[in-house]
Image (tube, helix red, strand yellow):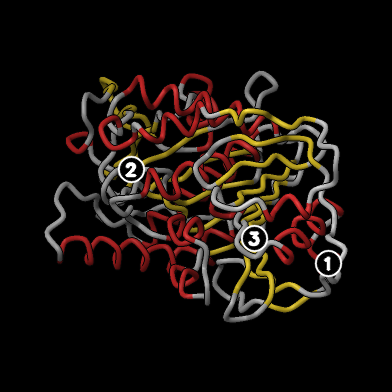
Amino acid sequence: MQIIRESTYRAAQEVAEAVEKHFTRRIDAAQSVGKEVLAYAPSKRTIEVVLDAAFWASLRREEGNPPKISIAFLPPDQAEMPMLFEQPIPFSPDTLIKIAPGVERPGIHLGIWPKDGELYIWGATRTIPSLCFVVDVSEPGLLVVKHRRTDGYGKFANVAVLKGDQVKVVDENGAALPDCPNLLSSLLSSSTSPGFFASTNVLIQLAVSMRAHHQGGSLLVVPSNSSAWQESIIRPIMYAVQPAYCALADLMLQEQENTNDALWQSKLRKEIDSLAGLTAVDGATIIDDQYNLLAFGAKIGRPPQATPIDQVMLTEPIIGDSGKVVHPSENGGTRHYSAAQFVHDQQDALAMVASQDGRFTIFSWSPCENMVQAHRIDSLLL
């Protein structure tokens, strides 16, 4: 059905066509391999109108509080046990700002669908189909377009981020970069691999939780079969953990039989949040690739034989970014520089750095480029 209303938010007009093509392409591809219970692809005009209303609502306040809303484009019959209004409510900034306090908890989506050329809010739901068009109002002026992955697991896949007049469209081909880390590849994928939970989802959840405490932090992931990383850590370590704290590691050993168990998932979230909380302490938190906690508050140093890092390949998985070689100091402050130096010296390690302003960077070694790669991924974590 054609949506009649025009949008006034210029960024919505600029990004709508790219978003429309993304959903059409993803849904067609999923249908071609037999995926069922898929969402409907939104039209360009629908995308414009949803983003327009969400943006103007985000700039307003209800009783002093900005709205936090998740808007999903689907008919009621595609939701499981939806909460239905007796009469559909017109979709507008006024409506959104009034209803926002009641639906701001994580996992709740306002359901919208067209009728007679206009969009209406039919109710709310916690369950949406794969590849459903979703717009999150995260903070004033900040919108995130995303969708549920085709197999339903893991964090929603981000499509575009709009902040005021700035637009970032996620590059689906970003994972094609030489030596792209698995964490980044998983964030860019619309589905998840069979080993998603064990291999990358924990790191993704750690990254999200690290951003959430807004205090900045560094997490170093080192190989469990080597102690060479210790050469890059200044002694003594203020908060060394001995023996290694293995609560998260033990939970991951149970992953195969408990992936769908609510109690196991709850325990996993608590351990992830506890570990991410340690990254707020000055210094780096260190875990091994089996998720054992080794230390926190650790200071990174350069081994005597190592050379200072003088360049990194800076990339961001958005359309229009081709990557560039820069001096590490151009990518951030001391925390970013020391993380880059650590990966430069310990090339089998991974470093994850959160800034207080929400910026998030993954540092990894690229044998193809023969240098450290700094991947900006905050646009994927919102």
Residue under label 3, please give it: 376
Q: How many residues crowd around disc 3 within 10 Å: few (fewer than 14), some, or many (20 or more)?
A: many
Task: Work out whether mark 1 precedes mark 2 in sequence or the reverse, and give the earlier one.
Answer: 2
Which amino acid lies under the numbered mark 3 shown in the image of this protein? Arg
Which residue in the protein does label 1 denote?
330
When asked about the image quadrant of residue 20, the answer is bottom left
Farthest residue in the left direction?
34
The Cα–Cα distance between marks 1 and 2, rounded to whole angstroms, is 36 Å
Find residue 277 and report its horizontal and vertical position in percent: 67, 29
User: What residue type is disc 2 on?
Assistant: Tyr
In the shown orientation, is residue 169 left or right of residue 47? right
Disc 1 is placed on an element classified as helix
Foreground of the two, 149 or 282: 282
Q: Secondary structure at mark 3?
A: strand
Q: Position of residue 318 (x, y in %)?
A: 56, 67
Q: Along the polypeptide, which appears first: circle 3 or circle 2?
A: 2
Q: Residue at x 66, y 18 (%)?
A: 63
